[in-house]
Amino acid sequence: MHETVKKLKHIEEIVNFKEKDLNLKKKPFIIAVSKTFKMDKIVPLIDEGHRDFGENKVQEAMDKWNEIKSQNEFIRLHLLGGLQTNKVKFAVKIFDFIHSVDSKKLAKKIREEEIKQNKKIKIFLQVNIGNENQKFGISRDDLDDLFLFCKEIDLDVVGLMCIPPVNLDPDPFFKELKNLNDKLNLTELSMGMSSDYKKAIENCSTFLRIGSDIFGKRD
């Protein structure tokens, strides 16, 4: 068994235990964050039937995934990094989920491309939950306005996403995002990475973005 498959199965065991222990309504999906990793580490997971993969950059995703995604229609590709408007047409073409929508300008551009390409993307609104200047994300104060705009233009917003501040307990930030998600009656939550996914599960995250615990350290 390939090393990445062993690591994924170990994480799946933890997720399954947490699901039963917490009596969760929804079992979280594991997004294998494959950014910067080559296909020799990714293909064993595909061969095992793993479905969800995450990339941070549109160009890298197109270079890596165009052919293999067309050969494996069950794969769902998630854009996790910030998206520039000039890359939206390519993002809509290759990705199934975009986790980083944080402005009306970006939302409008995505919707225009959806119409042109006759394709519907599942959208997460990224919230700057720690009010950090260096991070992408809509502020909590502006979230309702962005959400209503997305609904007006018929974007399929399924949930909220956040990256909590480094070196702080993520738990209160996850709790806050869940509360915001519940107020908007959204069903999906994109929270948790290799360092904090267990706490994210405890706060009802439905999509866990796990990279290094599956693929190892990045160069």
Image (cartoon, helix red, strand yellow):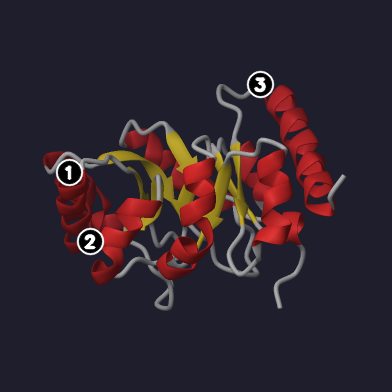
Q: Residue at x 66, y 48 (%)?
A: 197
Eye-nearest disc, 1 or 2: 2
Quadrant in which residue 84 is drawn: bottom left
In the rendered image, the vertical position of residue 148 relative to residue 87, given as above or below: above
Q: Residue at x 87, y 44 (%)?
A: 1
**How far from the left and from the top, in percent, is residue 96?**
40, 45
- Which is nearer the N-term, disc 1 or disc 3? 3
**Residue contact between numbered discs 1 and 2, judged by CB atoms under 8 Å:** no
Mark 2 surroundings within 10 Å by alpha-carbon count, few (fewer than 14), some (14 through 19), many (20 or more):
some
Quote the CA–CA distance across marks 1 and 2: 14 Å
Tell which of 173 and 212 is nearer to you: 212
Q: Quadrant of the C terminus?
A: bottom right
Eye-nearest disc, 3 or 2: 2
Quote the CA–CA distance across marks 1 and 3: 32 Å
- Which residue position holds label 2? 106
**How far from the left and from the top, in percent, is residue 27?**
61, 28
- Which is nearer the N-term, disc 3 or disc 2? 3
Q: Decide if residue 95 is on the left or right side of residue 213.
A: left
Whether residue 176 can be seen here: no
Mark 1 surroundings within 10 Å by alpha-carbon count, few (fewer than 14), some (14 through 19), many (20 or more):
few
Q: In the rendered structure, which amino acid carries the disc numbered 1?
A: Leu
- Which residue position holds label 3? 23
Q: In the rendered structure, which amino acid carries the disc numbered 3?
A: Asn
Mark number displayed over residue 148 = 1
**Which residue is the extreme one toward the right?**
1
Q: In the rendered structure, which amino acid carries the disc numbered 2?
A: Leu
